[in-house]
Amino acid sequence: MEENKNQSPSENQKKIIVQDKYPLSELTGKIIGCAMEVHKILGNGFQEVIYQRALAIEMSRQGLSYSREHEMEIFYKEENIGTRRVDFFVEGKIMVELKAIIQLENVHLAQAINYLEAYNMKIGLLINFGSQSLQFKRVMKPEKNHSPSNNQ
């Protein structure tokens, strides 16, 4: 079996992952491309930390700067109630949360949104390596002035 050594997504994949309607689409597209490369080589079935290490290598090879396992204090009514860690901050602009589970659920999306708010970030990626095909969702911080009656 011959292995495809191509380090970047195909042109069709680029059209899917880089879309002007998403803020910072070029950067999120590059991160998703790195995740696709990792998933192509490793497949599914490993623990999250294995994908985290591989993605760090791939992002470094693609020239992306990042911090890993960034810890943030969580407050409730101005009292520290604990800490949480996000998997990556990329280029100081994108929060990336990784999963290695069979299927992404709404609770994982809610977690990613909570992280955006806690870290005061506008855009994030939720990436799941655990399914047969790579799953990813772009996540944007909700606007606070949005009234619930307008959500339809």
Image (cartoon, rainbow, N blue to C red):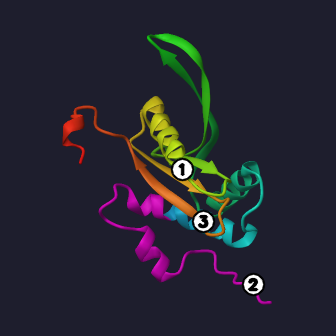
Secondary structure under tag 1 reads: loop
Q: CA distance from mark 3 to mark 2?
A: 18 Å
Q: Do callouts 2 and 1 mark residues in contact (Cβ within 8 Å)? A: no
Real-space CA distance between mark 2 and mark 1, rounded to the nearest whole angstrom: 32 Å
Identified by mark 2, the residue type is: Glu
The answer to which quarter of the image holds residue 108 is top right
Q: Earlier in the sequence, mark 2 or mark 1?
A: 2
Q: Nearer the viewer, residue 87 or 131?
A: 131
Residue 58, position as x, y percentages in the image: 66, 62
Q: Nearer the viewer, residue 84 or 65?
A: 84
Q: Nearer the viewer, residue 34 or 143?
A: 143
**Does 115 appear above or below 44?**
above
Q: Is residue 151 magenta?
A: no
Q: Name the residue that disc number 2 marks.
A: 3
Assess whether residue 22 is covered by the magenta stretch: yes
In this rendering, the label closer to the viewer, 2 or 1: 1
Q: Amino acid at mark 3?
A: Leu
Quarter of the image for residue 24 reads: bottom left
At a point 41% along the width and 76% down the height, the residue shown is 15
Residue span colored magenta: 1-29
Characterize the local packing of mark 2: few (<14), some (14-19) or many (20 or more) Cα atoms within 10 angstroms.
few
Q: Which mark is residue 134?
A: 3
* Residue identifier under label 1: 105
Where does the N terminus fall, quadrant-wise? Answer: bottom right
